Amino acid sequence: MIKIPRSEFSERINKLKEYMTKHDLDAMFVYGDEYRKENLRYVSNFWPIFEKGALLLRIDEEPILLCAPEGEQVAREMTAWDDVRLLPDFNCVTVPDVIEFPLANFTSFKEIADEFRSKGKLKRLGIIGMDAMSESLMLTIRETFDCEIVDANFMIFEMRLIKSENEIDCMREASRIAEKGYKAMMEADIIGKSERYAAGIAEGVARQEGAEHIIFTVFGSGDRSAKIIGRPENKIIEDGDMLMCTIAVQYEGYVASYGIPYAVGDYSDETKRVIDVLIGANTAGYPYLKAGVPMKDFVKAVRDYYRKEGLAEYDLYPPLHGAGCAEAESPYPNEMTEAVFEAGMCVNTDISLFGLAGGSNRVEEGFVITEEGAESFCPYLRKHFEDWVKAEK
């Protein structure tokens, strides 16, 4: 099975300990919940449902995974770590009530802080995920740990930038699953059906193929294609409609976004031109996805293509972002970004045009950067684009 082995989680923890030593941190707290799961999943493989979670770490100790009672068995099943403890502070995130769990063996932040102090100094605590947690939780941590708090987000962002072979395999599998679902939707007769019906085809096949989760399905048909991140609705898909759809599939904690600009039935020349330009911009940028090439060169190539076509005003945001444990992560370059692509980076194009008379759409394609160029995770998309260009000739 394609997955991240425990040995790789150990490597990540050891790397995090190196950061802790370098920045004089006595302990590290990595936060996550159902919605902001990426950092916690990266260091523990745990993904909470309803509840909050965290990983606590001292340099000379094995990690402690913190969770809430309902998710305890899921945590023990998923996590790479043996020490799992329950906190009442991490109970269901959506209710203000105090939920009773009479059989739960709770610990507390104070007990853990006292335990850490009994083993050594606790003067500086790094927190990863401070931006994702509630103010009340942050206040509790400050009061109970009673030490200097350091925002340590940058450490894990740097760690997640270059992917291992196992991570690349997970990204490749997430993309394969997304492509299977998307292909099924494109091949289905969806004229006269609702957007939700069409999205359900892609999502259902993706689940059948092994998707752990559908992070989102962005969808808009006809005039609704201009909804940049609209959800599928009950609007009926009509003959000639542009279909703007992206499906984001999660596999073993890794997320691939996938989207082919296409239209159904007898569509207009204006709609065809939108698709032509998007495919052309995608082709223009592709050669710059290579290790050692400045990221700004890719962005500039795509935007120069739009400028040449007189459509720059419909380009609303940069056409590329990183991908991994989150649907969008670093890097997120623009035309000023001097940093270069590095081998092992996973990126996702988001080449888009919104607000044209013929409709709006985007290209979402995943790649891993190599020394020779970029390996696409999306063979069906590549073949579809090649066939489209050949048909034009």
Image (cartoon, rainbow, N blue to C red):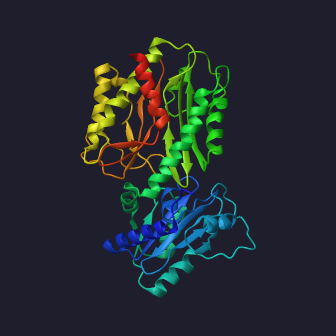
Q: Residue at x 56, y 15 (%)?
A: 240
Return the x and y of residue 380 as percentages of the image width and height.
Answer: 49, 34
Q: Residue at x 45, y 24 (%)?
A: 387
Return the x and y of residue 269 as percentages of the image width and height.
Answer: 46, 12
The C terminus appears in which quarter of the rendering? Answer: top left
Residue 149 seen in this snapshot: no
Return the x and y of residue 191 as percentages of the image width and height.
Answer: 64, 20
Where 179 falls versus 239 (above or below)? below
Q: Residue at x 60, y 73 (%)?
A: 84
Q: Nearer the viewer, residue 140 or 183?
A: 183
Q: How many marks?
A: 0
Q: Residue at x 60, y 47 (%)?
A: 211
Return the x and y of residue 80 as percentages of the image width and height.
Answer: 55, 69
Residue 39 seen in this snapshot: yes
The reply, left or right, for residue 53 in relation to residue 292 is: right
Quarter where residue 87 is shown: bottom right
The N terminus appears in which quarter of the rendering? Answer: bottom right
Where 163 falls versus 89 (above or below)? above
